[in-house]
Amino acid sequence: MTRARFLQYLAGWALFFMALPLRAFSGVRVRPVNDMAPRFTVPEGATLPITPVKDFYVEDISGVPAKVKQGTAGWTLHISGQVQKPLTLSPEDFKQRKQVTRIITLSCIGNPVGGHAIGNAEWRGVLLSSLLKEAGVDDSAEWLTFHGADGYHETLPLSEAMKPSGLLATHMNGKPLTRDHGRPVRLLIPGLYGIKQVKWITRMEVTSDWRAGYWHEKGWSREARVQVFSRIDLPKSGEWFQRGEQEIRGIAFAGDRGIDRVEVSWDGGKTWQVAEMEKPLSPWSWVFWRKRVEFERGGRYTVMVRAADQYSRVQDNTRRDPFPAGTTGYHKVEFRVY
Ligand SMILES: Nc1nc2c(c(=O)[nH]1)N[C@H]1C(S)=C(S)[C@@H](COP(=O)(O)O)O[C@H]1N2
Ligand SMILES: [Mo]
């Protein structure tokens, strides 16, 4: 089999597994090879500005590593490769460094249109750039590879890693990271999908050679830059309303590019109206939008949403599968007015 055929074959299987909608709601962990299947539940009510840890989606290749289950007392993170001064850091060493708190939204690249494999949290930790400066990166180095205790690995360009927004987080919403979310330390680089946000980090290596990440080896995007995403949270699909005023609302997200505008349609995409937006909690956070609409006539309505980032990149209406670079299509909800 040629490489292209092989990738097609993998892609085929990835599409097949992601097309099983029941998986998302069952909460059952089925894990076929090559399947990016984030576990998430759809909340009953409105979306909260900060996602409680218990409702935050979880995605990883083989669950919490044994090393983490045994406790993280002897844990160390090594920073090595093309650096002047290799570092070995314990959780205690992290505590002694300057603490930074950031609100950052995290989204899985496998999140479907309208999906909930996206959450917003307040992360605390140490700036990635400050640790790299401390280690003293060689001029000839270009890449930084992260290794997780489960064998997962990802590579970032050093230019991306040196951005002042990247965080090696030890805390989530004011508490130490839970095992599921990467205890004792994980990466958060705003602007990139979860694929890049390595959990349970044991080793970081500075190199001049690029190495494909775990999912990139399976055909997923190499850069994994977040696409413009918007979602309708209310009304829910299939709901019935009495004639009159009704609020439509939801979230929008564009990684580190910020949301400039959200537009809503309730005639199936023929006309669009600008929605009101709340101020985001940070430059890396999702935003809440809302629109009050007067529904005078009974019948069936299709509400749609689309957003644009601050570089005026309007959301793409092609309903792409999340594989290989994240989904793009507009979220639609159908409901009835009587
Ligand atoms: N070590 C490790 N880190 C990982 C993964 C993994 O399988 N192993 N999965 C990545 C993916 S695909 C996503 S979407 C995020 C999910 O983070 P969460 O489980 O905290 O929501 O973790 C990323 N980091
Ligand atoms: Mo993911």
Image (cartoon, rainbow, N blue to C red):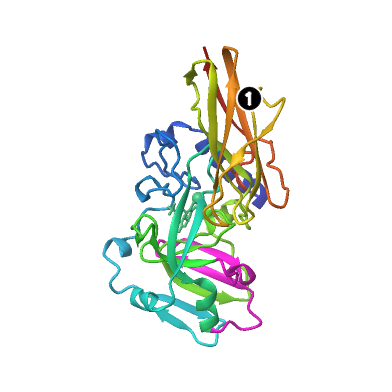
The answer to which quarter of the image holds residue 22 is: top left
Q: Decide whether residue 140 is among the magenta residues.
A: yes
- Residue position for label 1: 266
Residue 299: x percent and y percent? Answer: 57, 12
Is 188 situated left or right of 319 in this image? left
Residue visible at 53% across and 25% down in the picture: 246
Residue 176 appearing in the image: no
Does residue 182 sit above or below 2 in this rendering?
A: below
Amino acid on which disc 1 is placed: Trp
Residue 310: x percent and y percent? Answer: 69, 51
Residue 288: x percent and y percent? Answer: 54, 43
Identify the secondary structure beneath mark 1: loop
Residue 180: x percent and y percent? Answer: 36, 54
* Nearest to the observer: residue 49 or residue 94: 49
- CB at disc 1 and ligand 2 closer than 8 Å: no
* Nearest to the observer: residue 103 or residue 34: 103
Q: Residue furthest bottom?
A: 84
The residue segment tinted magenta is 136-165
